[in-house]
Amino acid sequence: MSYNKKHVSVTLPGVRGLSSSSGPRVCIVGGGPAGFYTAQQLLKVGDAAVDVYERLPVPFGLVRFGVAPDHPEVKNVINTFTQTAQHERCSFHGNVNVGKDVTIDELRQAYHAVVLSYGAEGNRSMGISGEDLPGVFSAKDFVGWYNGLPSNKELRPDLSCETAVILGQGNVALDVARILLAPVEMLKETDITQNALEALAGSKVRRVLIVGRRGPLQIACTIKELREMVNLPNTRADMLPADFEGIAEALKDLPRPRKRLTELMMKAAKEGGDDKAEKCWGFRFFRSPVEVIAGADGKRATGIRLALNKLEGSGESARAEVTGQLEDVDCGLIISSIGYKSIPIDPAVPFDPRRAIVPNEMGRVQDTAGLYCSGWVKRGPTGVIATTMNDSFDTARVLIQDMEAGKLDLSVNKPGAQAITALLQTRGVRTVLFSHWEKINAEEEKRGKFLGKPREKLLDVDEMLKILGRLLI
Amino acid sequence: MAASAAVRSAVSLTQRFVRVSPDCSICPLYRLNACTGATDGFTAPSRRLRTSIGVWQSGDSSSPEEEERVVNVVYIDRCGQRIPVQARAGENALHLAHKHGVDLEGACEASLACSTCHVYVSSEHYEKLPEPEEREDDMLDMAPMLQENSRLGCQIVLTPELDGMELTLPKVTRNFYVDGHVPKPH
């Protein structure tokens, strides 16, 4: 799609670093940790101008929508990202859906290099019957619901059952369990959404089982999250001694992180906790979901059928093998926490559907000069913010190397954001700049103050745009 | 901090003062209730600022007590470059790194909620550090390339006996200049 060249030279208000920048122009797709850390590194070296495009009007991705409300310190990294966004050679463009509002090819025409940092917005499905019944949710959606992700605001999970079963034993599974069992007095001081808070205040869930295919030595969560479960007030741990056979003997050969984690798990399993506690939680190992059981009317989940496994091999590479035995667990809430998944957003970009990542060599997208990737869309959806940080720095360094080695033609002038913003305007897309986000941020903090919370997140994209009103281009 | 407030209002260096004011909430001394409130617990980045304000214990004055409180630290960054810095007793290794432009991230801002300020401590000084608290060990467990002498920079508080300590930043990247490329200084 061509654009009227006359518009290119118009200086648009609020968009920094236009005609003044003489350095390379880089476009980053995705305004989460990967996008911002990649931008940070690119801005440090040389004189590149970096533009970050984000589908939502609000930045920060999973730091805003994934990190649990009771982990506010983890969100401190937002201050680092804010500094990056406010850098004179950086600009943020929110409310832009790359792949729909503008194509990757159009971005590649306007920039010397494009970095894909759009993460994993999809969900790995369990692939079992009954998965679509009411009462069954992906952890991604459940977390999105209590964290105010606009597309999950209508989730309305029914919390009137006694038992919840979570499939998967990573940190996301433990976050969900903890939010289900945490005292409301604690939650109400966090940035959890008000509608989730009210739903949890009326919740009848008292027992949460966290189910994994393999054994205690293969559990994917980390010790900080496990410790938080163990320390939950008015809650006791309820595990099966049989699941821990042979584990004590294996301890001495384990590397430190695995050893400390396993020791804490065994301690929790042995000690249990206060018998008078009203709530309980527990791991269940060697179990895979095979079917969601529907109630008599067939209209909602009332239980889950699990297959019992045995372990072949040991350590991280141990495999679960079926034994043929089955076990039914009554429950009214089933949350599948078996992984996020990246999706292809533009047919022009190579995509590996088996691994659900953009195929790449050290961050250079396969067979596509000038296209790079960082974060989960590059490596797969695992790891904490620090992992993504290191990975993003890697990609940035590779890109800088390529620029310095002449692998990208920097002699040709690229218009960058000027061209793209003009294009978006002709398509009726209202770009949200960082200064606009700061207004949304102030409004959220104001609403939060009224409720005794750090912020009350706006749940609706239209409402966000309305608040910005005539500020938008 | 009454003395500092008086000074601030008395001189027109207020602007710069505000910028260099310490954020107590992120200082481990404050969090551990070990803060004495003494103003020599933080240093201004500008020597000129220090020496022009008489109330501060300036590095320029050479009283014996002053010299004792200087701690020499060497950072070894991810390129292997040695960066010697002078610290004051009571500073923490993460803020010190930032002050001197050393490439040590502190994503969670010293609240023991990440492992991005992971450093290796020179062995003879590692022994002199107090034992890490459980929360630090929990975060260290998540750091890639954990070693015996690993610590989180935000939890290392400088004391005179740590003089000469070397803190090495882990080379965590898999594809870090594998072809031996040397980056331009920036």
Image: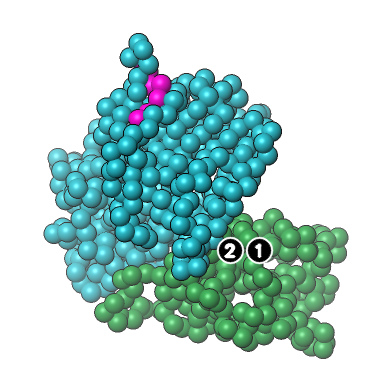
Residue at 50% over, 84% down? B82
Q: Nearer the viewer, residue B92 or A399?
A: B92
User: Numbered disc 1: what chain?
Assistant: B
**Label 2 with label 1: CB-CB less than 8 Å:** yes
Q: Nearer the viewer, residue A412 or A202?
A: A202
Mark drawn on residue B68: none
Chain B appears what colour?
green
User: Where, by quadrant of the figure, is residue A289 drawn?
Assistant: top left
Whole-percent x, y for residue B53 in the image:
79, 73
Badge 2: residue crowd in 10 Å (few <14, some 14–19, many ≥20): many
* Amino acid type indicated by mark 1: Glu
User: Numbered disc 2: what chain?
Assistant: B
Mark drawn on residue B133: 1
Label 2: which secondary element = helix
* Amino acid type indicated by mark 2: Asp
Q: Is residue A384 left or right of residue A268?
A: left
Residue at 44% over, 25% down? A330
- For the C terminus of chain A, the image quarter is top left
Whole-percent x, y for residue B90 in the image:
72, 72
Residue at 63% over, 61% down? B134
Q: Name the residue beneath numbered marker 2.
A: B137
Type of secondary structure dominating the magenta stretch: strand
> What is the letter of the cyan chain?
A
Label 1: which secondary element = loop
Badge 1: residue crowd in 10 Å (few <14, some 14–19, many ≥20): few
Magenta stretch in the rendered image: A299-305
Q: Is residue A188 left or right of residue B6?
A: left
Q: Is residue A409 left or right of residue B5?
A: left
Is residue B90 depicted above or below A421 in this figure? below
Q: Is residue A128 left or right of residue A351?
A: right
Whole-percent x, y for residue A151 in the image:
38, 29
